[in-house]
Image (cartoon, helix red, strand yellow):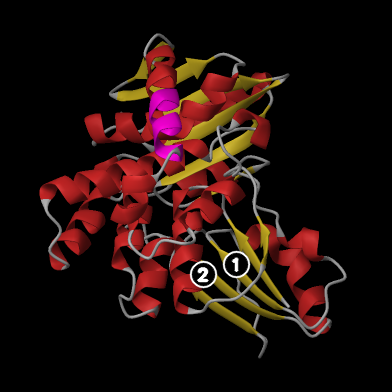
């Protein structure tokens, strides 16, 4: 019995796909929106299974690990988020690298000896790792047009992962994984995909709405305020990545109203991809990685405290 748990963004989907291309198996897929990361709890009571986890924080799933190991399960974990202290157990195998210059797709590519680099490149582009993606693309001899195609695929799959619930998304992440599953070559998928046209149009419309949002400058850093609307919940990731590339020396925060609370998407300065995770973990429901992190639920009355902490993290 196999279970594949994966983040619903580009990196999680493409990391899983590389692994299953190399190790085919009929597995139960468990995923959700990008920030639905406490996935291990869905396996409570599972026994004697092979569990593989991609692009999901071990630290956020810590409670579920020991009971599953005690029930005879084997867990293999690929990730690049903050992990904290990693448990030691003969049936727990972790390949975790929190460096801001890598992502889970690139980690899996290395473990597999470069068996499916095209998909790793898509994952890296989706995670806004332009330079590592370009280097790997150059290494395998892709043309400028092919690199552009893989970059769009990665960015659009990443865009699709953002939302509070899967109702906000154009496609459930499981459906996107199943769409690419038959394809060993991402360029072949691109040539035949119907999903990309939907994502391309949706992303363009949401970016137009985002461009009209309120912006607040703190020195050379920026805060962007979005309303409680589906487009705002979808666009926060790709818009913050876009702003990070446009102003690589500045930090950027997307602040989206979600019900009674605020949801934050934080990007460290691209030229110094550090401390975004430390900043966000200082608040309940915060987490992520050094270059990109977020807070799921911030009470509005805590926003001034966040801005003060943000200003100390990256002085102007």
Q: For mark 1, does the 10 Å Cα neighbourhood hold few (<14), some (14 to 19), or many (20 or more) residues?
A: many
Residue drawn at (55%, 42%) of the image: 280
Q: Would residue 229 be found to the left or right of residue 316 on screen?
A: right
Look at the picture and state if 141 lies above or below 152.
below
Q: Residue at x 69, y 61 (%)?
A: 61
**Regarding mark 2 in the picture, which secondary structure is present there?**
strand
* Res. 78 mark: 2
Give the residues drawn in magenta, as a range: 195-203
Asked whether residue 311 is in view, the answer is no
Q: Position of residue 79 (x, y in %)?
A: 50, 65
Q: Position of residue 25 (x, y in %)?
A: 60, 76
Of the pair 96 and 277, the residue shown nearer to us = 96
The answer to which quarter of the image holds residue 228 is top right
Q: Is residue 291 magenta?
A: no
Residue furthest out toward the front: 192
- Circle number at residue 53: 1
């Amino acid at each position: 019995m196999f279970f594949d748990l994966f983040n619903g963004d580009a990196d999680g989907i493409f990391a899983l796909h590389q692994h299953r291309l190399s190790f085919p198996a009929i597995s139960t897929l468990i995923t959700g929106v990008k920030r639905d990361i406490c996935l291990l709890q869905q396996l409570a009571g599972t026994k004697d299974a092979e569990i593989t986890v991609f692009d999901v924080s071990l630290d956020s799933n810590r409670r579920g690990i020991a009971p599953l190991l005690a029930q005879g399960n084997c867990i293999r974990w690929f990730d690049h988020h903050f992990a904290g202290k990693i448990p030691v157990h003969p049936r727990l195998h972790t390949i975790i690298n929190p460096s801001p210059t890598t992502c889970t797709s690139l980690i899996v590519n290395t473990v597999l000896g470069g068996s499916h680099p095209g998909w790793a490149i898509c994952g890296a582009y989706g995670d806004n790792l332009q330079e590592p993606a370009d280097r790997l693309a150059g290494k395998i001899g892709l043309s400028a047009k092919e690199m552009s195609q893989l970059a769009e695929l990665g960015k659009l799959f990443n865009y699709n992962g953002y939302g509070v619930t899967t109702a906000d998304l154009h496609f459930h992440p499981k459906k996107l994984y199943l769409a690419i599953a038959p394809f060993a070559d991402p360029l072949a998928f691109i040539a035949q995909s119907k999903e990309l046209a939907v994502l391309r149009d949706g992303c363009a419309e949401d970016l137009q709405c985002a461009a009209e949002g309120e912006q607040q400058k703190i020195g050379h850093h920026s805060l962007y305020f979005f309303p409680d609307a589906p487009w705002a919940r979808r666009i926060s990731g790709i818009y913050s990545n876009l702003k990070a590339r446009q102003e690589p020396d500045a930090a950027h925060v997307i602040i989206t109203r979600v019900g009674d609370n605020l949801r934050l998407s934080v990007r460290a300065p691209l030229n110094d991809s550090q401390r975004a995770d430390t900043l966000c973990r200082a608040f309940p429901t915060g987490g992520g990685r050094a270059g990109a992190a977020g807070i799921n639920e911030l009470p509005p009355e805590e926003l001034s405290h966040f801005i003060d902490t943000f200003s100390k993290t990256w002085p102007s």
